[in-house]
Amino acid sequence: MQNTGIAITGSGSAIPATFLDNQGLTKLVETSDEWIITRTGIRQRRIAKKDESLAALAATASKRAIAMAGITPPELDLILLATSTPDDLFGSACQIQALLGATRAVAFDLTAACSGFVFGLVTAAQFIKTNVYKNVLLVGADILSRWVNWQDRRTCILFGDAAGAVVLQANQSDRLLGFELKSDGSQNNCLNLPFHGQSKELTPGVFISQGNFQPITMNGKEVYRFAVQKVPEVIDKALFRANLCAEQIDWLLLHQANQRILDAVAQRLNIPQQKVISNIAYYGNTSAASIPLALDEAVRQGKIKSNDIIAASGFGAGLTWGAAIFQWGR
C-alpha cells in the first residue's frame, strides 16, 4: 500500500481568562517587572482557576481547530494529547474525546514536556503516512500553575497555562517536509517534576513508597546552554532531511521558553527577527501548548499563509528536543 502525505488543515487555541502580570508576582516573591522582562521577555501569563480543567481547555482549542479544518468530531480517527499535567494521572485524552463527541476516535496521551507538540506531530504523522488513519487531532495543553512553587523566583516567573490544537489530514502531497527528534536522559535533573515518596510498611518486611509529585525544579543556566546549543543543531538536521536551508523558511516557530533563547537560536541560524514568531510576552512558557498556541495566533492574524514553510522546534524536560519542517495548509 502506497504511503500517504499529511497536511495541517486547522488550528485552534484556548487560554484561561485569569492573568497574572509581573507586578502581581512582586507580591509573591522578591522580583520586579524590569527584572523579569530583561531575563525572559515575559510580561504576563494565564492562570487556570480551580474549576478549570485541562480537558475542557483542550476541548475548546480542539473545537476551533476542527472547525477550521472543515470536518466534524465524529470524523476524527485519533486524538493525541501532548501534556505533562493531565487532570487524571491515567491520562486526559479520553476525556477530550468525550467532550468533543468524537465517538470513532482512539485517544491517548503522550508525555514529552515542552517538546510534546513536536513529538506528537511526528507521532501523529506516522499513523497517516502508513494509511492507518486519515483525520488526527493533535492537542498540546498544560496547566503548569498546578505544579509551580510560587515562592521559587527561578521558576514561578516563567510558566503559564494554555491549550493549542491542530488537525492533521491525509493529503496527496506531504506537507511534513522533514523532522529530527532527540533525547538525553543523563540531563534529566536539569528540569524535572519528581515524585517524592515516604516509605510505608504494609506488613512486616513489605514496604511501599507513597507520596506526591513535587513542584518544578530547574537549573536555568544549564537549560539555557542546552537549548542554545542543541536547538539550532536539530533544526539544521531537520532542514537537511527536508532538502532545505534556513534561508528558505518563512517562519521560525520555537517553543516559547524564554525570549533570550528565541533570539539566540535565530541568530545562530541567521534567521532575521521578522521571521521569528513570538508571543511569550503575553503567555509565558506554556510547555506543550506553546507552539500550537503561537501557530494558531499567527494563522488567525494572517501572518502565516497557505504554503508558508515553518521550522518548529520544541525543547525541554527529559531532556528532549526536536524539530519539524512543515508547510501550512493543504
Image (tube, helix red, strand yellow):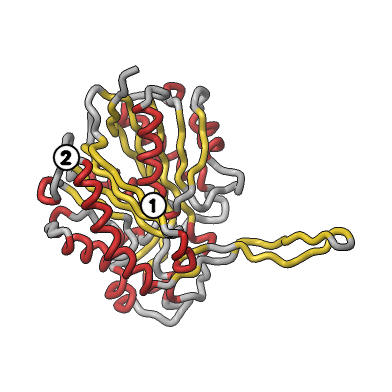
Q: Residues within 10 Å of mark 2 (few under 14, many from 20)?
A: some
Of the two numbered discs 2 and 1 on the same chain, state the one appearing first in sequence.
1
Query: Which is more toward the observer, 22 or 211?
Result: 211
Element under label 1? helix
Residue 177 location, quadrant = top left
Instruction: Name the one closer to the observer, 286 or 84.
Output: 84
**In terms of secondary structure, where does tag 2 sit?**
loop
Q: Which mark is nearer the camera, 2 or 1?
A: 1
Residue farthest to the bottom, as pictured: 30
Q: Is the residue 117 above or below the residue 223 in the image? A: above
Q: Is residue 301 visible?
A: no
* Horizontal arrangement in the rendering, residue 26 relative to residue 2 (left or right): right
Q: Is residue 167 visible?
A: yes
- Residue 150 marker: none
Residue 220, image x, y percentages: 39, 72
Residue topped by disc 2:
308
Q: Is residue 290 left or right of residue 53?
A: left
The residue labelled by disc 1 is 115
Query: Along the line of sight, which residue is nearer the eye, 87 or 252?
Result: 252
Three-letter code, disc 1: Ser
Q: Amino acid at mark 2?
A: Asp
Tell me residue 187's x, y (percent): 44, 65
Residue at the spot 57% in from the left edge and 63% down from the top edge = 194
Q: Is residue 91 left or right of residue 269?
A: right
User: Could you say where residue 191 lies in the image, as x and y percent from the top left?
Assistant: 46, 65
Quadrant for the C terminus in the image: top left
Q: Are marks 2 and 1 in contact (CB under 8 Å)?
A: no
Pinpoint residue 144: horizontal percent, then vertical percent.
48, 58
Q: Mark 1 packing: few (<14 Cα in 10 Å), some, or many (20+)?
A: many
In the image, is residue 252 above or below residue 149? above
